[in-house]
Image (spheres, helix red, strand yellow):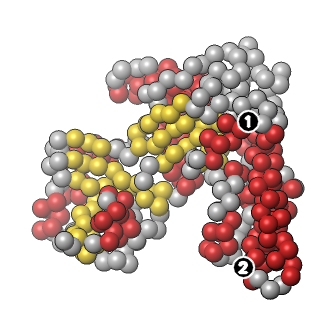
Amino acid sequence: MALKCGIVGLPNVGKSTLFNSLSSAKAQAANFPFCTIEPNVGVITVPDERLARLAELVNPRQIVPATVEIVDIAGLVKGASRGEGLGNKFLANIRETDAVIHVVRCFDGDVTHVDGSVDPVRDKEIIDMELQLKDLETVEARIAKVQKQAQSGGDKTAKRNYDIFMRLREALSCGKPARSVLFDNREDRRIADELFLLSSKPVLYVCNVDEASAVAGNAHSERLRRAAEGENAEVLVVAAKIEAEIAELDSYEEREMFLAEAGLAESGVSRLVKAAYKLLGLETFLTAGPKEVRAWTFVKGTKAPQVAGVIHSDFERTFIRAEVIRYEDYIELGSETACREAGKISIEGKDYAVKDGDVMHFRISG
C-alpha cells in the first residue's frame, strides 16, 4: 500500500521548499502567493536502515524501499470553502489524500506573509476553519436527506445515520475537526468515514522554523504545539531551508556531516516520514532473497493473509501459511539457512498478527 500525503498551508509558509527537499520532483518556490498552481506530485523513499543491513547479508540484485507519495497542494486562503482563491481545487485535492501535512510558518523574516504578520495559531485556525466549514456543508446536506425518515421512527438505519451526522455537526459547529468525534463501534466509524470529511484526516503539523531553531524550536512552534494539544495530531519542528540544503548534497557522508554540524541526529525528512507512519498506524514487513530485499507497508495489527495481499491480491485468497523470521534473529545469525537450522523460523497461520520488521515468506496454493 502506498501512503499518500498532501502538503497544505497558507501561501509563503515554506510549503514548496519543504516539498522540494522531500521529493525528486521540483515545485516552484517564490516570494508570492499561489506559486504552486497545480498539485505537484513526488515520491520519496521511507528511511529504513534495516534494508541496507539485510542487503549486506543477502546480496540481492536490488533494494526496494517503501515509498510515500507527496502532493504539494496549491496554497489556501480564507474563504476557500466558498470557492475563493484556489479553494475548490485545493479541497478536491486534499480529499484524495490519506493524511495531511500542514506546514505552518514559525519563522520571522523578509518573506511576505499573506496576512502581514507571523502568527502560527491564527494560520492553523484559518485552514482548520475552511476544512470544517466545507465538512459542515457536507454533513448538513446528508442530515437533510435522512432527517424525515429518522424522525418518523420507522427506519432504524436512517435513525442511526442521523444520530451520527448530528454528532459530527455538533463538533464542526463548535470549531472542532471531525476526527475529534470518537465512535463506540466500527460500524458507526464506517458510516462516518463514508462522508470523506476533510477534517477527519490525520494531521501532522510541521512547524517551519529558522535555522537557529531547528533543534529545539522557538516561541512560535511552542504556541502551535499547545494549540494542537488534544487534537490527536502530531507536531514536528523542521527547518525547511536546512532540508533543502541537505537535499542538494550528493553523498550520504556529506549529509551526515551537515546534520552533525547543525546539531541534528537525523534529517527532518526522515522524522517527517516516521511521524506520518505513526500517525496512520503503519508498520513495515520485509522480504529478502537473491532477487531483491524489499520493504512493504501494512496497517499495524493486520493478520498474515491480508499482509500477503499487500504483495499481490491473489496471495490473500490463496494464503496457506507464513514463514517468519524476526529481523534481529536474521541479523544475528546471518542468513535464512542459519535461522532455519537454529529453529528461528516460525510457521504462522491465518490468525497471526504481523509485527514491524518481520522478515516473511508466504506459502500459497495453486
Q: Quadrant of the C terminus?
A: bottom left
Q: Quadrant of residue 249?
A: top left
Secondary structure under badge 1? helix
Image: 13 above or below 337? above
Disc number placed over residue 157 in the picture, else none: 2
Image position, residue 143 (x, y; %): 81, 65
Q: Nearer the viewer, residue 361 or 209?
A: 361
| Horizontal side, residue 275 vs residue 81: left or right | left
Residue name at image x 62 percent, y 25 percent: 36
Reply above or below: 49 against 247.
below
Task: Give the residue at mark 1.
Answer: 87
Tell me the kind of residue under disc 1: Gly
Left or right, residue 11 beside residue 287: right
Helix, strand, or loop for circle 2?
A: helix
Can the viewer see residue 208 in this picture? no
Please tell me which residue is depicted at 76% across the width and 55% down the height of the picture. Answer: 138
Q: Position of residue 218 (x, y in %)?
A: 71, 31
Q: Residue at x 73, y 13 (%)?
A: 110
> Which disc, if any, is residue 150?
none
Query: Which amino acid, mark 2?
Result: Thr
Query: Badges 1 and 2: C-beta atoms under 8 Å apart?
Result: no
The answer to which of 48 and 33 lies nearer the viewer is 33
Query: Which mark sits nearer the N-terminus, 1 or 2?
Result: 1
Question: Can the viewer see residue 1?
Answer: yes
Percent position (x, y) of residue 236?
62, 40
- Using the numbered discs, state the Cα–Cα distance from disc 1 to disc 2 in whole angstroms: 34 Å
